[in-house]
Image: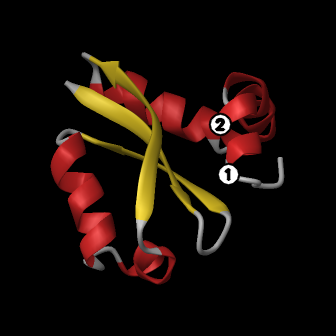
Amino acid sequence: MFYVYILYSTKLRKKYIGYTEDLRNRVEQHNSGKVTFTAKGRPWQLIYYQAFVSKLDAQEEERFLKSGKGRERLKILLKHTLQENNTPP
């Protein structure tokens, strides 16, 4: 399985979108500082994920969620989650 996931940092009040084949391990990598791009935002909280059989489908979904229309979809999909964390849309 391949996963598209969204992490949230209360410290930075930012989201991070990625994809992986091993979701549990990848979240641990983000929270242990092994991922340079996210090291300053620790701790990261997993707020959303999707599972895919196809790696290509997961990669395409990750790209979509990072696009303008994808960000708009996330505002609707995670409306209450983002409000609880006081993150800007």
Give the residue at x 77% y 24%: 76
Identify residue for label 1: 85
In this rendered view, identify the residue nearer to me: 64 or 10: 10
Element at badge 2? helix
Residue at the outermost front position: 84
Q: Is residue 2 above or below residue 88?
A: above
Element at badge 1? loop
Residue 56 is left or right of residue 68, and the answer is left
Residue 14 figure quarter: bottom right
Give the residue at x 28% y 20%: 54
- Confirm or deny contact between disc 1 and disc 2 (CB under 8 A): yes
Relative image position of residue 73 (x, y in whole percent): 74, 26
In this rendered view, identify the residue nearer to me: 84 or 62: 84
Q: How many marks?
A: 2
Q: What residue type is disc 1 on?
A: Asn
In this rendered view, identify the residue nearer to me: 35 or 55: 35
Residue 42 is left or right of residue 34, and the answer is right
Q: Is residue 67 above or below residue 1?
A: below
Relative image position of residue 77 (x, y in whole percent): 68, 23
Q: Residues within 10 Å of mark 2 (few under 14, many from 20)?
A: few
Residue 75 is left or right of residue 54, and the answer is right
| C-alpha span from label 1 to label 2 | 6 Å
Identify residue for label 2: 81
Relative image position of residue 39 (x, y in whole percent): 41, 80
